[in-house]
Amino acid sequence: MNKLVLILIMCLPYLASAQPGVAPVVEKNGKKYYEHIVESGNTLWGLQGMYGVPVEQIVKENPSLSNGLKEGQKVYIPVTADSIKKIPTTDYKVDKGETLYGLARKFNTTIDDLVALNPELKDAGLTKGQMIKVPIQESGQELPKVDPPIKPIKEPLSTTPNPFVVDTITKKDGSKEQISFSFSDSTIRHIVMSHETLYSVSKRFMVSVDEIVRINGLISTSIKEGQILIIPVQKERVERLEIKKIPDNKEDKATGPLVFEKKKKYKIAVLLPFYLDGGDSYSSRVSQLATQFYMGAKLAVDSLERRGLSADLIIFDTKNDSAYILNILADTSFRSMDLVIGPFYEAHVGMLAEYCKEHIIRLVCPVAISEEFLEENRLVYESVPTGEVTMELLAIQLLKNNSRDHVVLVKPNLESDVAMYNAFREAYQSAPYVGQRPALVETSLDGFTSQFRSGVVNHIIMPAKDKKTAMKFMNSLGRNGSRSSNVFVYGTKEWEGYSEISNMTKNKYNFRFASSNFLDYYSDIAISVNRRHRAFFKTDLSRMAAHGYDVVSYFCADFFLSTTVKKPTMVMSGFTMEQVSPTSGYRNTRIFVVQQEEYELIDTGVKHD
């Protein structure tokens, strides 16, 4: 009995140094393994006992073991539920500011094992005072109970913006040579800037997105300004740098339009949230809109083939999930795309814009996006003006065509609408104008009815998308009793769908709104495209299908067809692309002014382009 106890005591160092939770976890061919270093006294039966993995499975994963174990040999043992259970644990109280990454380093284990031991951490993360299970330290002794708990290991803070440095060395023959260094076994703390995405950070530091997510214990790929990320520095390397002479006429920044080579056949990627496999964020409405957009896009490519375009339309399902988009971009074949159309959500534009800028691919956004995505990126095209841009263009149009009229701008109550108010105001007061600039009357929602003038045409602008604000405005207008023949009220496109606002009042006061599109189903082009849509898809052309048709028709014709080829007519949209600055992307500056007349919406024929 005493001998047995003695043998067990002698074996403790081997058991402790090789147990799950201590052996490093590596990934091979998409599977995770414990990397066990064979020590004196190890046997296959002993490994089975240590890791809870049958001998047959260990040998299957390591064919060289058929010749027996050798000291120093690496054995890869699959990480399984049984091996997780083999980790000897103790309870630990989480301190303020501790992370899974810090705890994994403190207890010489992995984040995956900590989550496996504490499944609740997968979604909820760590909170101060939480009791979790952690591996017993390597010595076999439990961690002493400390109150307060031991502080987490602090990562060294580096002020170096990039972990690579360049130096010059003098060789024995007197010549000089430049070399670059990077260092292993260290990390830096990176503070996220406003324009950065997880994808751009990963490319900057040459670390995979998955690695950054794993090390920082992130539960999604979303990051925000000011967030601190721990970034592992690449393994040590020394390489010679080729020093090239800088041309005398080198520009500080590339400007103007980009030039692309002509091809016999083009690849067009369309990224849409179809939700083909369902999922937690599944939306039937969004899935339908994505399908309709695709139908219009497909019809456009078929039509352009008759004009000489040869192109493949390649469809990707994004599921409204940044992880799916990152997987799409991770495939090196995506670099061969000539045009990317998408995504449907502004939240995903950043990563696509960064990717397209790096690989010189034009990106057309089919939805309104913030102009910050256009800054310093000539590859991005915004096909739908934002509310602010629409109001800016409306102000310029009124200043140009209605300078003799009385223009009243009503300030909305909600902060979310004030941006449109400011855009109209600034454009009206600063846009180029010959002669004495007409006055702009600014007023509040409660006092705008007192600003009407008799004997002149009154244009009343209420830049608000909010339903309650729109209803209050129109109700006040109805109670005012002013003559309506000389009043034109301007709201936003959203008012069109507010059934609570009386159509009679809209008709009476010549309700108008500025829009990037106007669909007249009785126009010749709409009838023609709808016939082809019915023949192909056995259903009528929807507004989203018309939008898909117009976006693909315009940009593919503009990018890929010869200037001598007659360009297709748009069904409902207008496009006048204007570069925001010499180094930035392009925005659409075409709007329609739509008016409700006799309970129907009509195009007033007044356009800004």
Image: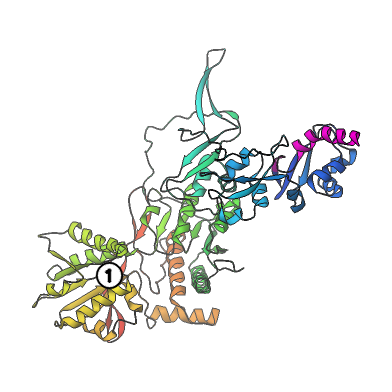
Q: Please tell me which residue is depicted at 34% across the width and 48% down the height of the picture.
A: 582
Is 352 in the magenta?
no
Q: Is residue 369 left or right of residue 125?
A: left
Q: Quadrant of residue 6?
A: top right
Q: 230 and 430: which one is in front?
A: 230
Looking at the rendered structure, the secondary structure element under dot 1 is: strand
Query: Label 1 amino acid?
Result: Lys
Q: Position of residue 418 (x, y in %)?
A: 27, 62
Q: Which residues are magenta?
A: 1-25
Q: Which residue is mark 1?
A: 607
Q: Residue furthest top?
A: 173
Q: Is residue 169 above or below residue 8?
A: above
Q: Is residue 171 left or right of residue 434?
A: right
Q: Residue 563 placed where, x, y %?
A: 40, 61
- Position of 77 with respect to 273 (left or right) is right
Could you tell me residue 32's position as x and y percent? 71, 48
Quarter of the figure that contains the C terminus: bottom left
